[in-house]
Image (cartoon, rainbow, N blue to C red):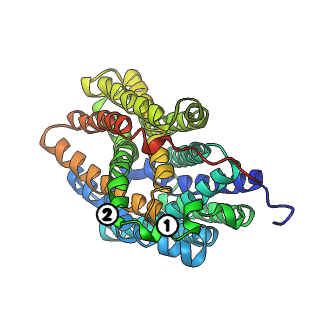
Amino acid sequence: MTPTRTPGRARLGVSLMFFTNGVLLSALLPRYPEIKDALDLSNTGFGLTVVAFPLGAIVSAALAGKAVRAFGTRTVTAVGSVLLAAGTATAGLSDVAWLFFAALFVAGALDAVVDAAQNVHGVAVERWLGRSAINSFHAVWSLGAATGGVIGAWAAAQDVPVGTQMVVNGVVWSLVALVASAISAVPDEHLHPVEETSDVTEARPRSHAWVLLAPLVLLAICGTLVEDVANNWVVLFLGTETSAPVGVAGLGLTVVLVSQFVGRLVGDPMTDRWGRAAVARTGGLVVAAGMVPVVLGAPYPVTMAGFALMGFGCATLVPAAFAAADGVPGLPAGTGIALLGWLMRLGFLLTSPVVGAFSDAVDLRTAMLLPLVGGLVAAVLAHRLRGSLSARPAPSAA
């Protein structure tokens, strides 16, 4: 071990990885309403277009485990982040629907691999620390996404061209990603679960691993469903379904992401005290409670508060699923997280088209029942998974 390789330094590096990943796409999201208008898309057409990002992720995410084992988590994260920045910049520069779709597809494919790599590395740092840390990494992702949302909303208010904004955004955060990779080294003994050092993993049937992994995937889908609604529909909802001013509506995504950040910031101490299952179960119920005023047509300040509760409640769902997936027996190093990341993106693939079709057939307000139901399902799953979610990081020997 080199003298400069410490858990704190590695934690800072992983935090920068997550922040960069959060800001790269989210800076584009507040510009979606004007992109939708510029491309002359209906709600259904818009929903089918932005599905390109999760579709690209589904195509590539199953390969993330192999990429991590072949090149290492830090290399995959650094190179992938630079390429992801190029993809989001291309999306911002697109003036036709097919190019916008293609750029989002490529960006989604890259994001899935980067996401798996940074989560594998984050869990390794958690093992080195000997205490819960995964929620704080996802909190920093939320902070990065909120920062991206502010950047996008400010650029829209200043009439900065979308393409210009996204090119500058990509260059800046590509440099940060390279720095993050350089400072986040972790000793080899912490890179994989202890079980991976023996032949026991290979002897266990893969079917048993899938039985353990499947409900974790569903829990993660409940979390990503809420995130997808926030990414693609909150700003549009506030602008069309409430009397919120344009500037306020544009900050809707930021409100959700800041609330999610707070939930993840306090998620680690809550997890260490009450356990992942109890925290995730309560979070699902908070999501459902937050969506009640949204569905009932409350005034926009109350609706904004409801979206804030939605963000706070979903905060620990995906981190809990990732942490548990890394320890699923019967899978090679990095495979549990890679498969979870791949399959949970089915939620992203389905959410926007369903919300778009439902809003065209009925209305967008009624379509907000989807995250309400997702919160209730997450609460039930977290209760049933309390055994799988109860594992804690082993105390560090470093």
Q: Position of residue 287 (x, y in %)?
A: 37, 31
Q: Position of residue 113 (x, y in %)?
A: 48, 67
Give me the disc on residue 11. none
Between 71 and 192, the one nearer to me in the picture: 192
Q: Quadrant of residue 237?
A: top left
State the separation of the CA atoms marked 2 and 1: 15 Å
Between 257 and 116, the one nearer to me in the picture: 116
In this view of the protein, can residue 26 be seen by the observer? yes
Is 171 above or below relative to 393?
Answer: below
In this view of the protein, can residue 164 be seen by the observer? no
Q: Which residue is mark 2?
A: 207
- Which of the image's four quarters has the C terminus? bottom right
- Which of the image's four quarters has the N terminus? bottom right
**Residue type marked 2:** Ser
Q: Secondary structure at mark 1?
A: helix
Q: Position of residue 153 (x, y in %)?
A: 50, 44
Q: Quadrant of residue 143?
A: top right
How dense is the environment of label 1, judged by Cα within 10 Å: few (below 14), some, or many (20 and up)?
Answer: few
Q: Position of residue 134 (x, y in %)?
A: 58, 47
Picture residue at 63% right of the left edge, 63% below the top:
191
Q: Is residue 32 left or right of residue 180?
A: left
The residue lying furthest to the left in this view is 361
Q: Secondary structure at mark 2?
A: helix
Give me the disc on residue 200. 1
Is 192 above or below relative to 365?
Answer: below
Query: From the viewer's perspective, is the residue at label 2 or at label 1 nearer?
Result: 1
**Residue type marked 1:** Val
Is 301 above or below relative to 238?
Answer: above
Is 205 above or below relative to 19?
Answer: below
The residue lying furthest to the bottom in this view is 70
How dense is the environment of label 2, judged by Cα within 10 Å: few (below 14), some, or many (20 and up)?
Answer: few
